[in-house]
Image (cartoon, rainbow, N blue to C red):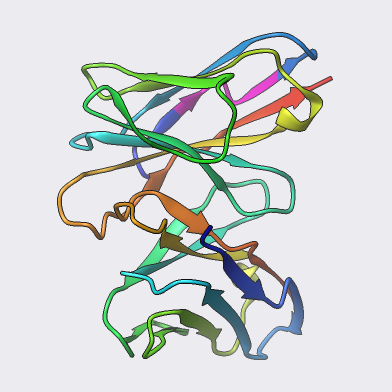
Amino acid sequence: ETGVTQSPTHLIKTRGQQVTLRCSSQSGHNTVSWYQQALGQGPQFIFQYYREEENGRGNFPPRFSGLQFPNYSSELNVNALELDDSALYLCASSLVGWYQETQYFGPGTRLLVL
Amino acid sequence: GQQVMQIPQYQHVQEGEDFTTYCNSSTTLSNIQWYKQRPGGHPVFLIQLVKSGEVKKQKRLTFQFGEAKKNSSLHITATQTTDVGTYFCAGPGHGSSGSRLTFGEGTQLTVNP
């Protein structure tokens, strides 16, 4: 186990709703990255938070937003949910320092949008 | 943008056979990482390669990083049913730190007992 936890484990929402997913990083890690993994595909980078600020963003619209808290835990918020947002959302924590940072993934939140 | 491609997409083997998955990046990578995802699970870090031409072994798994640092491979010798899962390679996004990864599409390995 990596020590990275995510909640909830599963979630069902309807189109147009909003959702908040949570992640607690591994002890000692100061960076949290969020990924979206659609069925049968590799994880896609959404954004990263370091020292409570967004530190890089992938090709995702502004309705995907996030927060990082002083204890390095993080939230992913998605507004105006669309059917294509159905996916496994993965949080990964790492320690910024040397550039070869290993990412430790949490178990993910499976989101289904109906 | 940067692309990371993996082949094959699927591989079915009999237990005891060898397995290889190949990874190619459209850009030179500072490092490449490999992950394994079991069915219904999440990606689990296997290894990171940093040096050009680097070869690392973990029991029956052999990882290679190409001389040009644009390709990599994972070879499993004498597969076992516990090797079932999807294997992903991932590299740091162009111009970014190592923790913003671009993943390949993965190779899904099934092993028939």
Q: Main secondary structure of the magenta part?
A: strand
Residue A41, x across and y down, in percent: 69, 53
Give the image quarter of residue B109: bottom right
Q: Is residue A65 magenta?
A: no
Where does the N terminus of chain A fall, quadrant-wise?
A: top left
Q: Is residue A79 left or right of residue A108?
A: right
**Residue at the left extreme?**
A97
Q: From which residue to which does the magenta span run? A: A6-11
Relative side of A6 to B14, left or right: left
Would you place residue B98 above or below residue B80 in this image? above
Q: Is-magenta flag for residue A9?
A: yes
Q: Hey, which residue is sitting farthest front in the picture?
A: B1
Residue drawn 62% across the image and 78% down it: B80
Q: How many marks?
A: 0
Whole-percent x and y of residue A52? 26, 22
Position of A47 relative to A63 (above/below) = below
With respect to residue A76, does B75 lie above or below?
below
**Image vertical order of residue B25 relative to residue B38, above or below:** below
Tell me if residue B113 can be seen: no
Of residues A110 and B30, the one drawn nearer to the viewer in this rendering: B30
Q: Quarter of the image holding residue B23? A: bottom right
Where does the C terminus of chain A fall, quadrant-wise? top right
| Observer able to see residue A32 | yes
Question: Where does the image place residue B91, in percent across and percent down from the top left?
Answer: 43, 63
Residue for point 15% across, 49% down = A97
Residue A72: x %, y % from top left: 26, 25
Between B60 and A77, the one nearer to me in the picture: A77
Q: Residue furthest right?
A: A114
At a point 29% along the width and 24% down the height, the residue shown is: A53
Q: Tell me what residue is drawn at x 34 percent, y 37 percent.
A: A3
